[in-house]
Amino acid sequence: MLKDLCKVHDLIRVQVEVDDWEKAVNQGIQLLEAADFVEDGYGHAIIEDTKEHGPYYVICPGVAMPHARPEAGVKANGISIMTLKNPVNFGNPDNDPVHIVISLAATDNVTHLEMMQDVVTMLSSEENINKIKEADTADKILALL
């Protein structure tokens, strides 16, 4: 599922330059907006939620999976994957700095859990995480999906 979404809609970027976590979130969400998976304002909802509840979506060392509730502007299920040229801190002392940003849009809780399970499977080994982090092309990341 993830591979098809990313390949068809060109939703993988490597070595993206950002200054902070907010820009990282916005860059990932802009990919989803361009593919018409989310409405304008979805990224803002994630940023506001992060400011209120913290970076709960930094799921393991070096990996963030920003997302918001479906009613925040999800039109269709989608995912974007970005690697950062220079890692940034999201405010999670256990898992910062973040090198990989996987932005998620899910229309319902069941799909949300299925997509997260696919991501967790992809990130199940440190070797895969390192391959994603070091990838210099989108195709190298697609091969891991």
Image: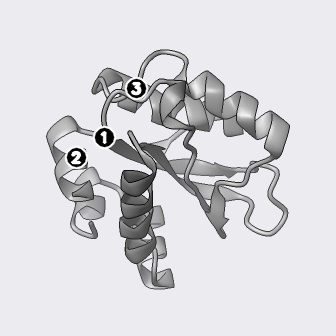
Relative placement, left or right, of 143 versus 53 is left
Say few, some or many: other residues with alpha carbon within 10 Å of mark 2 (under 14 / 14 to 19 / 20 or more). Answer: some
Q: Relative to 130, does residue 139 appear above or below in the rendering?
A: above
- Give yes or no for contact between labels 1 and 3 (Cβ–Cβ under 8 Å): no
Query: Which residue is disc 2 drawn over?
Result: 5
Q: Amino acid at mark 2?
A: Leu
- Give yes or no for contact between labels 2 and 1 (Cβ–Cβ under 8 Å): yes
**Disc number for residue 38:** 3
Identity of the residue drawn at 57% across and 45% down: 66
Q: Secondary structure at mark 3?
A: loop
Give residue 43's position: percent from left, percent from top: 57, 27
Marks 2 and 1, the one that precedes in the sequence: 2
Say few, some or many: other residues with alpha carbon within 10 Å of mark 3 (under 14 / 14 to 19 / 20 or more). Answer: many
Q: Secondary structure at mark 1?
A: loop
Q: Amino acid at mark 3?
A: Val
Q: Estimate the spatial distance between the alpha carbons at disc 1 and disc 3, rounded to whole Å.
A: 13 Å
Marks 2 and 3, the one that precedes in the sequence: 2
Give residue 18's position: percent from left, percent from top: 61, 35
Q: Estimate the spatial distance between the alpha carbons at disc 2 and disc 3, rounded to whole Å.
A: 14 Å
Q: Amino acid at mark 1?
A: Leu
Identity of the residue drawn at 32% across and 22% down: 34
Which of the image's four quarters has the C terminus?
A: bottom left
Q: Nearer the viewer, residue 118 or 138?
A: 118
Query: Which residue is disc 1 drawn over?
Result: 11
Give residue 111's position: percent from left, percent from top: 36, 53
Relative placement, left or right, of 62 versus 34 is right
Type of colouring: one colour
Q: Secondary structure at mark 2?
A: helix
